Amino acid sequence: MIVLSPTCVQQHSAPDCGFYARYFSDCLIDNLRKIIKSWDAHLDQIPDGLQRCNDQRQYEVAYKSFARKLGRSSEKKQTVPTNLLEHQIRQLGSNAVPVLSSIEAARSSILSGVLQDDLLTVASNVSRNGHAVLICNTTTTQLAGEHWVGILVRRKSNVNRYLVCDSLFRGIRSQHRNLCNRLDAVLKLYLNK
């Protein structure tokens, strides 16, 4: 398994990670062909096509749009929600990016015979297209609430590769590897269904 962590726009306050994760997933989708082509050519290098993930001005434009979609002004006069919940992250975009609020909840769910729609969509996209973009919470419990990140999964030669876009990344790749190990284990359960 390969896990890469590109440089991305960094958040100024901790509870804003849902906005950033949505922005990163939109950037991944918008540049998907270029990213995949570059990544397939150089498996262990950060692929081309990720410049927008590290563009503060572009993020600020997106943030204003996100605030409007939640029915709030991005000006300081009105409070924009922070520490977003799963349904609020879904409201931010027009594309249907799967949102996984807890890997552990998805694991428990499949082990009890119930499939989660979002992870089923990810598994289906990976199986059919060889890739999937999702937004995932990093929590290690069955409850959401830690930190949201954008992820691109690329399956090639039966090996999943992960690109983790994180607004709190400070050079600690081991956290991303741990997250992707957990996601990979659950994804394999769904791919085998």
Image (cartoon, grey):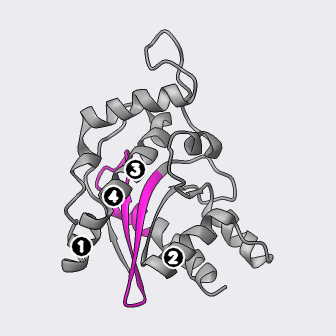
Residue 160 horizontal/vertical position (percent): 42, 80
CA–CA distance between discs 3 and 4?
A: 24 Å
Q: Quadrant of residue 82?
A: top right
Amino acid type, callout 2: Asp
Amino acid type, callout 4: Ile
- Say whether disc 4 or disc 1 marks the residue closer to the N-terminus: 1
CA–CA distance between discs 4 and 1?
A: 26 Å
Q: Name the front one of labels 4 and 2.
A: 2
| Pointer 3 local density, CA inside 10 Å: few below 14, some 14–19, many at least 20 | many
For image coordinates 27% across by 58% down, the residue present is 6
SS for callout 1? helix
The residue indicated by pointer 2 is 184
The residue indicated by pointer 1 is 37
- Magenta residues, start to end: 149-178
The residue indicated by pointer 3 is 26
For image coordinates 41% across by 26% down, the residue present is 64
The residue indicated by pointer 4 is 172
- Say whether disc 2 or disc 3 marks the residue closer to the N-terminus: 3
